[in-house]
Image (spheres, grey):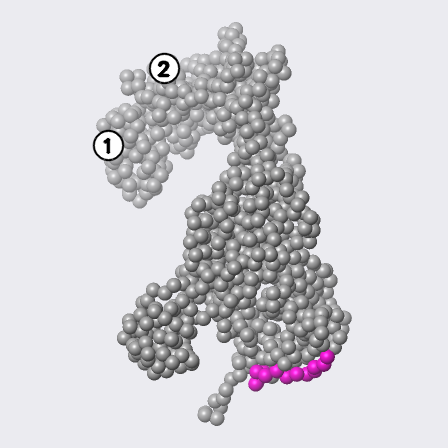
């Protein structure tokens, strides 16, 4: 028996359990491969402070013959090219052909990837299904040569096999290109590559993405936001977030000579004084050698840590998207009448800081509304009803560290919080235990140094109470704003229809009266008398005001955009291609313009969630701004770069220009 | 005929008055408003001396320049217009036809004047009360939903109808039975028996119960329509016949009896003309299952709706008599209701041969 026992390599294990990594079926596998490559590219660019410019190409490949149509193909070649910093020559093979090799696992810092499995697993999947190696071209700068590699993974040893390496000429001055051939299936719709690309752009408006579909189409998704997310800092673990075993390991590995020094030095938010307090509470000497603390003593120390009140971990390790960027992403990608975005202040679960951001797009957009109006020309018969907006259910788009989550929706904490929110309070219909109904997209993003996924394939966020609570609070704020918008619109509509119905009914009443009177009535006179009364009673010009026809902005709705056939109000994202001259054109004599205009782009920065300038006092809820200000004090804010120029608040229509 | 012509003009005048309300108000720059008597429990009183439910004085305003009422106001004028058209053409019509006549799409919109008949029916009742004009006077008829058989001779549109010679089916009672339209030429019966259900009326008619007991058999197939109630009332008034009511033993049966006796809440304004305060409740009483040894298994368990309705009845002022309170409470404590049809459990002809003869002999009825 003993002779049969032997070591299992990680790669072998994953060969057998590839569903754990998101390669369960060909369709999902194709998506996972694209996703891993794109995530890596984005992480690399952002870390280097480069605005990502990504090209994703998916082509159908024939099995020996000419490529079949995309919908019938079973093999695909995926090529992802970025303009990132490139990879040094020696690192290329292990990064792409060694599982669990990466820079991200051992540090507490927010990034898309976490474990170092993704891209190598994708490569391995390709190798397994098509036998083709992964091809990499990488160049670290215009002066360095481009390197071409063909690598495979040795599944037994979990080591890269280099099939070919050479220097080549490459047109790009800098960046990385990965090509792999995998078995897959291309099908549009939910959880497709197309959807992934669309959702990625919503949460990453700073990315310029070119997507060449298997059907030969080229989709250009322009950049709508021109700041690289601030690079998050690495932090030490927070004492609340570690388990006993981890503590023991840290005690062994530390370079400190004293216990108090270990506590203060290896954890975040533990001051030397606090460290001594902890030691005292645990009945240990602050001068004890960390290596000598084990067994019962370590357990006492662990308990003492949990019982001590320690400040929440620092949050500069996080890089939330920011309200303005979310708005910009939603506005560009989703047609609607109303958009809003909320960034929650950072919170903590199990010692890990996290930020929840939520956004919402509602409606079908003014074009659709106009089309609907023209369509309804047929009068309704008895029993026929207008097919309202309420049949369609809301769509929830979920993100973790800016990566869209496309599978296992129902198992995700985000989805559950959406269900648990009482949307009816905000004027949206919702059946028991179902998503709210209506033309609505709900966006939720969790940014954290460690997102608690329910599985290795990173498809759903585990339900921690602290996370659920934050999501719910963010959704409620979105809901409140949506409610305010819907009520306001309803009021305007009803005022309008009030005026309309009187005009319509006067006609009917006068005609009936004329018939009753045997046709001997001064019709015109009666009509005029009634019409005069109608205008007087519906308040004439005042209605226009309520209807928002005087062009006032969305009062009391922070971080929101309202789109009507007459125009757009709110923090409309500026197209980044816009010449700076547009800024001066903005001076339309609005005294508050400068202050207002300055605010949104600052809000866009990472700091938006932490401290927002109080410039727009009247518009924002007092409670909210107070909460933010308090928070700003807690976080160690870094000085904001002064050269960031305010973006003009353009009253531009959607589209380019 | 001359009388008929004059009456029509008064109704027509009343309908034209609707237009005058609008015109006058417009001239004085006032909001055109109709005052419509409220037709609900809160606005009816039970006159114990007369034994009638009467409409109170409360009125509700229906104004044109009120968003909630504008459409209803417009519809009211439209219906008045259609009713006036009927008067002028001297035609009668149904509620449904009125609905179709007034339904059209409003100019320059995709909105219909009326969406369902449920909207126009109450408007006709509103106009009846407001203008103090009867439905028959407005030339609106309901379905012929009632039958009569017995020693009775009627004249309908000049045709002599002998209800003793119409076989099992009898004569279908028209919805308008005013003397101008229907004459009671002759009646030799001793009493009128009004049966809730058509099935039981068929049983009695087939068994020629009216011949053996010399009575007029009437049915309204459920809640009796105006024509049947009015005919019973006329037989009671003109021929001095007592009226007995035979209904199921359930809250709805009790209510049917009370409508025949005191009038209904919704049509309280018609009580004067339709109610028969001396009508007697002959069965099925909640005491009968015991007295006639009906097995418990032919009863039906009262459902929540039945119980709620029974409790409502207990609170109505016209059900405060001691006999009625015990009757209803007994049903509630039994927890069962019985259909008339359940008597067939004993014998197909039990109703005709045993039940009714014994009831009449013992004078076992409730007032």
In the image, residue A156 lies at what x, y percent? 57, 85
Residue on which the image places disc 2: B237
Taking the spot 59% from the left edge, 34% from the top edge, the residue there is A550
Q: Is residue A160 magenta?
A: yes
Q: Which residues are magenta?
A: A155-167
Q: Quadrant of residue A227?
A: bottom right
Looking at the image, residue B99 lies above or below residue B299: above
Residue shown at 55% from the left, 65% from the top: A231
Task: Tell which circle, 1 or 2, labels the residue nearer the N-terminal end.
Answer: 2
Going 68% across and 83% down the picture, which residue do you hit? A163
Q: Position of residue A392 (x, y in %)?
A: 55, 49
- Mark 1–mark 2 Cα distance, whole angstroms, equals 30 Å
Disc number at residue B236?
none
Q: Tell me the mark number nearer the camera, choosing from 1 and 2.
A: 1
On the image, the x and y values in percent for residue A589 come to 61, 38
Closer-to-camera residue (A418/A584): A584
Query: A68 or A414, which lies in front?
Result: A414
Residue B243 visible within the image? no
* Residue B290 highlighted magenta (yes or no): no
Secondary structure state at the residue bearing disc 2: helix
> Which quadrant holds the C terminus of chain B?
top left
Q: Would residue A628 appear left or right of B278 to someone viewing this image?
A: right
**Looking at the image, which residue sits at the far top?**
B2
Q: Which residue is mark 1?
A: B326
Mark 1 vs mark 2: tell me if same chain: yes
Output the chain of dot 1.
Answer: B
Disc 1, SS: helix
Subunit that carries the residue with mark 2? B
- Helix, strand or loop for the magenta stretch, by majority: strand
């Amino acid at each position: 028996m003993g002779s049969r026992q032997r070591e299992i390599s990680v790669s072998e294990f994953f060969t057998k359990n590839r569903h754990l990594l998101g390669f369960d079926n060909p369709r999902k596998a194709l998506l996972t491969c694209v996703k891993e490559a794109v995530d890596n590219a984005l992480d690399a660019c952002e870390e280097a402070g480069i605005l990502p410019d990504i090209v994703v190409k998916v082509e159908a490949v024939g099995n020996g013959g000419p490529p079949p149509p995309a919908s019938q193909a079973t093999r695909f070649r995926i090529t992802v090219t970025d303009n990132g910093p490139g990879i040094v020559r020696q690192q290329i093979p292990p990064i792409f052909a060694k599982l669990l090799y990466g820079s991200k696992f051992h540090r507490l810092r927010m990034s898309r990837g976490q474990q170092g499995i993704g891209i190598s697993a994708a490569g391995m999947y390709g190798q397994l299904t098509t036998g083709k190696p992964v091809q990499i071209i990488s160049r670290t700068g215009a002066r360095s040569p481009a390197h071409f590699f063909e690598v495979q993974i040795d599944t037994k040893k979990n080591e890269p096999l280099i099939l070919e390496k050479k220097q080549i000429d490459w047109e790009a001055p800098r960046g990385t290109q990965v090509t792999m051939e995998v078995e897959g299936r291309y099908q549009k719709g939910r959880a497709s590559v197309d959807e992934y690309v669309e959702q990625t752009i919503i949460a990453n408006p700073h990315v310029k993405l070119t997507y060449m579909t298997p059907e030969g189409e080229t989709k250009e998704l322009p950049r709508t936001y021109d700041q690289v997310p601030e690079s998050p800092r690495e932090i030490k673990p927070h004492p609340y977030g570690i388990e006993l075993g981890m503590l023991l390991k840290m005690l062994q590995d530390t370079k400190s000579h004293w216990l108090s020094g270990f506590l203060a030095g290896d954890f975040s938010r533990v001051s030397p004084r606090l460290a001594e307090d902890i030691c005292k509470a645990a009945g240990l000497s602050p001068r004890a050698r960390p290596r000598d603390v084990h067994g019962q003593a370590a357990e006492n120390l662990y308990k003492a840590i949990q019982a001590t009140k320690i400040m929440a971990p620092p949050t500069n390790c996080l890089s939330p998207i920011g309200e303005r960027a979310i708005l910009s992403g939603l506005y560009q990608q989703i047609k609607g009448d109303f958009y809003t975005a909320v960034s929650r202040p950072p919170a903590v679960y199990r010692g890990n800081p996290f930020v929840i951001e939520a956004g919402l797009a509602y409606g079908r957009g003014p074009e659709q509304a106009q089309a609907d109006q023209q369509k309804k020309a047929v009068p309704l018969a008895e029993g026929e009803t207008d097919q309202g907006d309420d049949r369609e259910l809301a769509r929830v788009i979920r993100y973790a560290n800016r990566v869209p989550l496309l599978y296992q929706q129902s198992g995700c904490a985000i989805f559950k919080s959406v269900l648990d929110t009482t949307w009816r309070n905000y004027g949206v219909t919702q059946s028991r235990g179902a998503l709210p109904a209506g033309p609505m997209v709900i966006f939720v993003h969790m940014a954290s140094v460690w997102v608690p996924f329910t599985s290795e394939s990173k498809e759903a966020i585990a339900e921690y109470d602290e996370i659920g609570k934050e999501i719910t609070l963010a959704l409620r704020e979105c809901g409140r704003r949506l409610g305010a918008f819907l009520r306001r619109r309803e009021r305007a509509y009803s005022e309008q229809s009030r005026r309309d119905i009187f005009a319509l009914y006067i006609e009917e009443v006068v005609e009936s009266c004329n018939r009753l009177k045997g046709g001997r009535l001064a019709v015109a006179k009666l009509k005029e008398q009634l019409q005069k009364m109608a205008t007087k009673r519906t308040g004439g010009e005042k209605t226009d005001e309520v209807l928002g026809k005087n062009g006032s902005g969305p009062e009391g709705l922070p971080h929101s955009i309202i789109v009507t056939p007459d125009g757009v109000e709110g923090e409309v994202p500026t197209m980044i291609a816009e010449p700076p001259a547009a800024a001066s054109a903005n001076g339309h004599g609005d005294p508050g313009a400068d202050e207002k205009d300055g605010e949104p782009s600052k809000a866009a920065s990472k700091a938006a969630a932490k401290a927002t300038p109080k410039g727009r006092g009247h518009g924002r809820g007092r409670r909210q701004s107070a909460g933010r200000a308090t928070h700003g004090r807690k976080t160690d804010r870094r000085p904001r770069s002064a050269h960031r120029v305010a973006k003009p608040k353009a009253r531009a229509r959607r589209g380019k220009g | 005929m001359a009388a008929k012509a004059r009456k029509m003009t008064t109704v027509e005048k009343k309908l034209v008055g609707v237009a005058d309300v609008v015109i006058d108000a417009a001239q004085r720059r006032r909001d055109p408003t109709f005052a419509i008597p409220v037709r609900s429990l809160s606005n009816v009183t039970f006159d114990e001396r007369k034994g009638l439910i009467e409409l109170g004085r409360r009125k509700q305003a229906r104004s044109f320049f009120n968003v909630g009422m504008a459409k209803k106001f417009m519809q009211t004028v439209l219906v008045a217009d259609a009713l006036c058209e009927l008067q002028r053409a001297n035609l009668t019509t149904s509620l449904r036809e009125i609905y179709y006549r007034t339904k059209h799409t409003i100019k320059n919109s995709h909105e219909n004047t009326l969406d369902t008949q449920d909207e126009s029916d109450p408007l006709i009742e509103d106009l009846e009360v407001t203008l103090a004009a009867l439905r028959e006077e407005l030339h609106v008829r309901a379905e012929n939903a009632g039958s009569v058989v017995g020693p009775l001779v009627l004249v309908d549109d000049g045709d002599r109808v002998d209800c003793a010679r119409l076989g099992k089916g009898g004569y279908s009672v028209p919805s308008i039975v005013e003397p101008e339209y229907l004459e009671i030429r002759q009646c030799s019966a001793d009493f009128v028996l009004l049966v809730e259900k058509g099935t039981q009326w068929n049983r009695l008619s087939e068994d020629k119960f009216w011949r053996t007991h010399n009575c007029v058999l009437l049915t309204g197939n459920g809640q009796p329509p105006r024509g049947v109630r009015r005919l019973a009332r006329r037989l009671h008034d003109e021929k001095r016949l007592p009226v007995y009511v035979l209904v199921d033993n359930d809250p709805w049966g009790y209510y049917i009896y009370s409508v025949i006796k005191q009038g209904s809440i919704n049509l309280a304004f018609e009580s004067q003309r339709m109610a028969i305060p001396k009508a007697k409740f002959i069965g099925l009483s909640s005491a009968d299952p015991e007295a006639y040894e009906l097995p418990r298994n032919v009863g039906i368990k009262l459902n929540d709706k039945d119980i709620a309705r029974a409790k409502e009845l207990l609170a109505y002022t016209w059900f405060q008599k001691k006999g009625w309170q015990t009757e209803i409470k007994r049903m509630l404590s039994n927890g069962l209701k019985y259909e008339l049809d359940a008597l067939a459990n004993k014998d197909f002809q039990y109703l005709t041969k045993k039940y009714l003869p014994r009831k009449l002999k013992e004078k076992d009825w409730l007032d």
